[in-house]
Amino acid sequence: MTTYDERASHGGPPTRAESRAGGDLTATAERVRRSVEGVIEGKPEVVRLALTVLLAEGHLLIEDVPGVGKTMLAKALARSVDCSVRRIQFTPDLLPSDITGVSVFDQQRRDFEFKPGAIFAQIVIGDEINRASPKTQSALLESMEERQVTVDGHSYELPSPFMVVATQNPVEMEGTYPLPEAQRDRFMARVSIGYPSPEAELRMLDTHGSISPLDDMQPVAHAHEIVKLVEAVRTVHVADSVRRYAVEVVTATRHHPELRLGASPRATLHLLRAAKAAAALAGREFALPDDVQSLAVAVLAHRLLPTAQAQLSRRTSEQVVHDILQRTPVPDPFGHQPPGARRL
Amino acid sequence: MSGSARLAICAVVATLGATCALLPLVDRTTWIVQAALLLSVQAAVGALARRIPLAAPVTVAAQVLAAVLMLTLVFAGGQAVGGVLPGPAVFREFAQLLQEGADDVGRYAIPAPATPAIRLLLVGGVLLVGLAVDALAVTYRTAAPAGLPLLALYSVGAGLSHGGGDWLWFLAAASGYLLLLLAEGRDRLSRWGRVFGGGTRADSAGVLAAGGPALAPVRTGRRIGALALGIALLAPAVLPSISGGLLGPRGEGEGAGDDGGTISAVNPLVSLQNSLNQPENREVMRYRTSAESAQDMYLRIVALDRFDGASWRASERRVTDVPEPLPTPTGLMPGVRTDPVNTSVSAASGYGQDYLPLPYPAERVRIGGQWRYEPEGRTLVGDHGQTTRGMRYQVESLMVQPTAAQLAAAPAPPAPLLREYTQVPPSLPKSVETTARKVTAGAANAYQQAVRLQDWFSTSGGFRYDTQVQSGSGTGAIERFLEDKRGFCVHFSFSMAAMARTLGIPARVAVGFTPGTPQADGTVSVGSKDAHSWPELYFEGTGWTRFEPTPSRGSQPEYSVAPSPATTDPGVPLPLPGRSHAPTASPSTGGGCPPQLKKADGCPGTPVQADSGSSGGGPSATTVALAAGALAALVLPVLPVLWRSRIRARRLGGTGEPAQRTLAAWRELIDSAWDHGILPEESHTPRQAAARMVTAGRLEGPPAQAAERLATAVEQVLYAPQPGPSGDPAADAGTAVAGLGAAAGRWVRLRARLAPRSAARLLWAAHRRRSQAAVRLRSGRAAAAARRVARAAQALRPRGRRA
């Protein structure tokens, strides 16, 4: 297990609370985004999604083949923000207490003292999370969802912002424990980085050839700026029609003939929160159906289980969500739907 | 033979089979040989094209070309380049021929003469149907729909001809079609290769061995076809409710007489006797007239102008469209006093007659329905089964009131008319003429002869009006009547007309109604007992003039009453050969009517079930429906355009809330894009819709910016807590729509304007309203049912407690 030490956060110019999602906050988010994009070449949408999840108080699951920069993305995000970061390398012998912490007897004070585990950080990078045993994986559950850790009957609050960025390798199956549905559901979004384009790969050779770009990275935002951003995201307005639209999209996954398991109500919540964050990132004070659409695949696909038949015909969850988006009508302000309009 | 060739031959045979139904329409049948020849060539061209092989549309095009060339060669060879190649002159010739053909079709009764124009219509039509059959059955391999053009061809013949032998034409047409189906089925079967079943028999085995397709199914197909044909022919004959079927006698009431039944050649053998002997006098029509006295309002149905010695009948005449106004009556000169008379007639719904009762001479007739005009008899004839049943019509007619002097001074009629209307058959007993000469002895002119004949029949001759007389038969009927001196209107009119002819006075018999009985409300009621016939004699200057020889019936016209024997003006005697003033022998023995006169059947005009007529005029329901239909046909295509422009004005010119104006402008932009072919996607958000408009509508610069600006404004309105200030949405929509129009082609622009696709919203709206109404209805029913259940439960409750 490797951990980064907690960095001391240093003060910065306070962000104007009244500016909400506009002005300085947008600028802060933009700085973080640029900083991460300097490391992850040619993947702006992935960086944007990671930032969206951070602002929406969610957790991110990065799933891809080895070597495309999963850990790099997580580290870059962590380093761009001046906050406490820990990295947990999940291995089969990792114990739950390694994550949550342990109470040890202090001889001098003659009392048990809680030694916080690796989870006590603002950004936690869980590398190759599917290598840990289910017992250890489930130790993450409470902390991810409730943002607290309970050891020996004592609950310990986790710092804010708190975000788990887990990576997973989908091809290497031997000796791994794939994340169960319940745990996948706790991640707000799943993202695949994918291979870079040849140009981006060339640029990467130039910049990453001699030194690691992470070495030069400096934090571009303070933790409390991120907290302000998160608060600003909470105030983003979501019109009734957009809420209804999100619900319709999620409901459609529960009745889709190609899906064995649809998305949970928590998914709806995550979808709407992510949409709000995306709206804030775009400098808007209100969410649009476009925000819901742009995030639906990332937020919903990893929670869905395709039927055996869909798997046989090589239909992925992502395709099904795309399909649903194309079929679900956007709320029509005129209330005029053609007869027999395609509704799910 | 290949399946395709067999199919092509069957297609030709089927077309010719259906063509046979047209044979009775034309008096000569040689055209069918020509049609068969050209059809075969056309089919051969198709077969050749398929063998090459050419694409299906090219094959059809080649056949069309071949047909045009052949028609040019046959019908317009003189105008063609090199006798074959059609130039503009050829098409002009075709157009003229077709025009003439259309006129001929209207002019001639069936069987029509085979004029070149009619031949072109027939041969061209057969080629067209043949092409359709060949294309469907052979080129596109769907034989079943080929029955439709065949049916159309057969229907033309079957619908127009009334002659016998219908079953034969049906057999020919149906066999042809079945043959075609069989050939196609066989062809399809053969593609499956050898089919087992029924192959154990030696004959089929032999054919199979020879490489032919399996024949058992083909044989079954033949049996089914023959069975179907047999049922089609026999079943209607057996079933009593279907009027006789194809093999049976023709149903009554179709206006067809036993002489071939053409429109103009109906023989209205009036069963006047039956009408007159009816126990009750049923009203057949009611009219209101402007004539001072109704006593001269004889309503004439038809003129019987052919006399064969035994009976009078109407000759076959050409009918035309009803002219407006009707031509000047034959022989009527300006010097004769004529008073215009307006009459509105309302026929009883039970009175179905295919000739229209009219006062003579009518000048204008305003009537709905399909009527044709027979100029010689000045009668209107119903076309395509049109009858007087329940008709209401207005007639402008003339009350011709010649003076006795004018009639007496009438010059000789024109020679052709004289020749035609003084014909008597040689079989007419001589006694008729001798009686006539005896009665009219001493008369100075034709007029006086006519008056004396009328007087002799009505008063001095000792004749008695009797509708119960026993009829005689044969050519001696008139002779017997002159001897018995008992009879009714038919005997009197027939005899007087015949005798006038023997005297050289052009004569014919009119059939119709006497003026009827005036009613208290000013109308005049005509009953079945008013059926009547009277002679019409021709006098140059006056035209056909009515006389009334029947005693105690009708009224004698003023000009024919009590003429002075010593006429001041002796007039000009008609220069007729063989005219003698010598008295003749008295009428020979024998009496009664020719049997045909009393035949009840074959008389379409028999007022058997005359209901009480309805009064009043006005346009008929058909006219109103036609007018409404025409109006709808004019208005319907422009409805979307009108709706669209109204909606556009309302949306862009709105003065409501800014949010409402933004949404209305957005809606207008969406619909305009739809009109330009960019279909609105229901899963698109405003900015996606705008982006699609920009890419699909090729918008650039200000229009693109306007569309995006409008989309952003819509987002603000729809999703923002407090919409920001929007610009001028109507102007943005206008700019974007103008950009769409500018980027689109001319055709798209035109279509967007004239046939806007977004007019589909009209239909949706209608559909939605209907669904909502249905839901309300259902919920209403459900609520009512629930109330009933509740009531029932309430009614049961006390009983339950008691229990």
Image: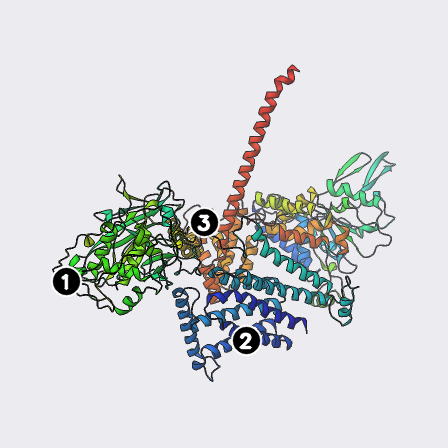
Q: Tag 2 or tag 1, which sits nearer the N-term?
A: 2
Residue drawn at 58 percent across, 29 percent down: B786
Do we see residue A216 in this rendering? Answer: yes
Tag 3, which chain? Answer: B
Q: Are marks 1 and 3 on the same chain?
A: yes
Number of other residues with Cα within 10 Å of mark 1, as a class: few under 14, some 14 to 19, many 20 or more: some
Callout 2: residue from which chain? B
User: Looking at the image, which residue is at 75% across and 56% down?
Assistant: A313
Q: Which mark is residue B661?
A: 3
Would you call the spot at circle 3 few (<14 residues within 10 Å), some (14-19), or many (20 or more)?
A: many
The percent coordinates of residue A265 (x first, y second) are 69, 42
Q: Which residue is mark 1?
A: B570
- Considering only order in the chain, which callout, 3 or 1, is on the residue closer to the N terminus? 1
Identified by mark 2, the residue type is Leu
Q: Quadrant of the N terminus of chain B?
A: bottom right
B529 over B111 or under it: above or below: above
Q: Amino acid at mark 3?
A: Arg
* Rendered image quadrant of residue B578: bottom left
In the picture, the disc for residue B158 is none
Element under disc 2? helix
**Against B97, is A6 above or below?**
above
Q: What is the three-letter code of the residue carrying label 1?
A: Pro
Judge if badges 1 and 2 mark residues of a common chain. Answer: yes
Q: Which residue is mark 2?
A: B37
Q: Nearer the viewer, mark 1 or mark 2?
A: 1
| Display colour scheme | rainbow
Chain letter of disc 1 in the image: B
- Element type where label 3 sits in the image: helix
